[in-house]
């Protein structure tokens, strides 16, 4: 990872993949493709594809992990060895442990885990194809999977990445842009409640730039939220 | 086929207007929101959302079907199709006097036996106790158990039992439904009964289901 490039990433306001600065890649969402799980979803942002599944609420062992007053959420984020051009060595590493944790923290505020004392809800996020912004794609997928598993929630969590390249503020970074950006910010929020649940920043930004990017992120998350809603309801729509 | 209105978590169901908060909803600034992906149902007294998926949460008084998990010294642990298991004490299960020094509890229920019972106690931390001290509770012998989404059991039973009565009549099967999402079926025509119950589960959010099932069983 982390390949630098010499070519211009943004020419006359058009990005390498012919997008405008505030344009996302093509987004695809599908709910319920893993039958053995209680809930599942697949979300793709361009070439980045995340597959999420939720198992539970189910009994939690060893017993010392149990919380007597509330349930817990456990998240595993994992990148498949074939998800990137150079083989990623399989298994957990520093990066995936961190992303597992921030994914959990981004989703926990949306859940009513007190309804399920002593048990666990297990969420698994598998990145089967990686091309930048994998953590936000994973959060979008896991949020959908939790809703389809029937876990009580205040609202869906939508996430997107924003950043800065050559002084231009952009939305939804792909792999190439991610590696060469001056700064990138991952944002997860509940758009209809206006609550931000994840905010991570890499690189340097001025205060004005950050505030502008947050505005962009909010707008994008709103759009993603509508798509998530449609993906969930698709199965239950009548044929008229 | 026409479908019922479906809401997602965070959707506003209705203004509260002094009504009781039912299941599957939460309140913010006098507005009632859904906790689940489900079908909203608001009456003049309360507001509910019936989830379309999810696991069973034990509730006091529910009539459930359980499978004996382990045999203890003075009772049994029962798997109730939930993350929590229920304890069925000997005194709540057997009428006669049992001398614990001599008797072997597997005489009454052994691992794998199916019982129809009632939840007599559910604490806040979900310690669950079951009881068989009423005339409906019994051991279910032979037959098959199928799992459905627990929230769809009322739909399978129908208004005042209309749907389940129809299935029983047309197939001649014995059917027992547990509120925990297990259905026990015994009889010659059980394949047909299972098929119709699974259809109800799959299409519970649509309108005009009774007619469809009637047609299905009529063939």
Image: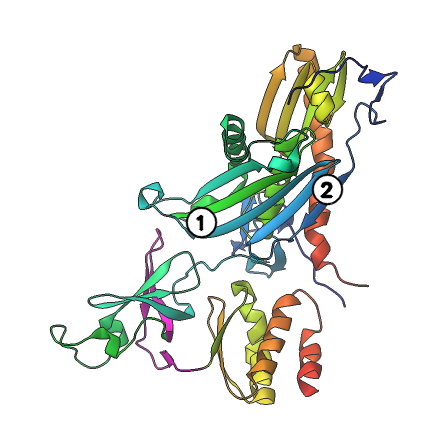
What distance separates the C-alpha of mark 1 from that of mark 2?
27 Å
Residue A158 seen by the camera: no
> At numbered mark 2, what does the secondary structure look like: helix, strand or loop?
helix
Q: Which numbered disc, 1 or 2, marks the residue that appears first in the sequence?
A: 1
Residue at image coords 51%, 50%: A55
Q: Quadrant of the N terminus of chain B?
A: bottom right
Q: Is residue A216 left or right of residue B30?
A: right
Chain on which label 1 sits: A
- Between residue A143 and residue B209, name the one nearer to us: A143
Magenta segment: B114-142
Residue at numbered disc 1: A115
Residue at numbered disc 2: A226
Q: Residues within 10 Å of mark 2 (few under 14, many from 20)?
A: few
How many numbered marks, from 0 up?
A: 2
Q: How is the image coloured?
A: rainbow
Q: Is residue A220 left or right of residue A101?
A: right
């Amino acid at each position: 990872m982390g390949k630098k490039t010499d070519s211009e990433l943004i020419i006359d306001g058009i990005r390498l993949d012919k997008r405008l600065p505030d344009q996302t890649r093509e987004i695809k969402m599908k709910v319920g493709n893993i039958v053995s799980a209680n809930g599942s979803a697949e979300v793709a942002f361009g070439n980045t594809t995340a597959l999420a599944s939720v198992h539970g609420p189910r009994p939690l062992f060893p017993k010392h992990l149990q919380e007597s007053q509330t349930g817990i959420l456990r998240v595993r984020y994992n990148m498949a060895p074939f998800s990137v051009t150079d083989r990623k060595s399989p298994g957990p590493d520093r990066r995936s442990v961190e992303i597992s944790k921030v994914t959990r923290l981004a989703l926990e505020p949306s859940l009513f885990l007190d309804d399920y004392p002593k048990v666990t809800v297990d969420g698994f996020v598998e990145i089967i194809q990686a091309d930048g912004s994998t953590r936000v794609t994973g959060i979008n997928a896991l949020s959908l999977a939790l809703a389809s598993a029937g876990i009580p929630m205040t609202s869906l969590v939508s996430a997107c990445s924003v950043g800065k390249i050559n002084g231009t503020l952009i939305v939804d970074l792909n792999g190439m842009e991610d590696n060469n950006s001056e700064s990138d910010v991952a944002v997860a929020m509940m758009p209809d409640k206006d609550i931000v649940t994840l905010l991570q920043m890499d690189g340097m930004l001025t205060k004005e730039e950050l505030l502008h990017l947050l505005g962009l992120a909010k707008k994008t998350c709103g759009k993603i939220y509508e798509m998530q809603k449609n993906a969930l309801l698709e199965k239950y729509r009548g044929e008229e | 086929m026409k479908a019922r209105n479906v809401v997602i978590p965070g959707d506003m169901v209705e203004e509260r207007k002094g009504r009781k908060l039912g299941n599957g909803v939460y309140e913010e600034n006098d507005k009632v929101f859904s906790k689940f992906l489900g079908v909203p149902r608001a009456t003049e007294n309360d507001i509910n959302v019936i989830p379309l998926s999810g696991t069973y949460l034990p509730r006091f008084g529910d009539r459930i079907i359980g499978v004996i998990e382990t045999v203890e010294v003075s009772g049994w642990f029962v798997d109730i199709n939930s993350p929590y298991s229920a304890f069925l004490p000997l005194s709540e299960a057997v009428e006669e006097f049992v001398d614990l020094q001599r008797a072997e509890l597997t005489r009454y229920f052994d691992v794998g036996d199916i019982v129809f019972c009632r939840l007599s106690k559910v604490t806040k931390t979900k310690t669950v106790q079951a009881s068989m001290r009423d005339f409906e509770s019994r051991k279910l012998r032979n037959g098959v158990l199928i799992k459905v989404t627990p929230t769809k059991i009322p739909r399978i039973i129908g208004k005042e039992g209309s749907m389940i009565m129809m299935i029983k009549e047309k197939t001649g099967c014995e059917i027992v439904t547990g509120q925990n999402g297990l259905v026990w079926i015994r009889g010659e025509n059980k394949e047909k009964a299972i098929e119709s119950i699974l259809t109800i589960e799959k299409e519970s959010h649509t309108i005009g289901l009774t007619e469809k099932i009637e047609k299905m069983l009529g063939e």
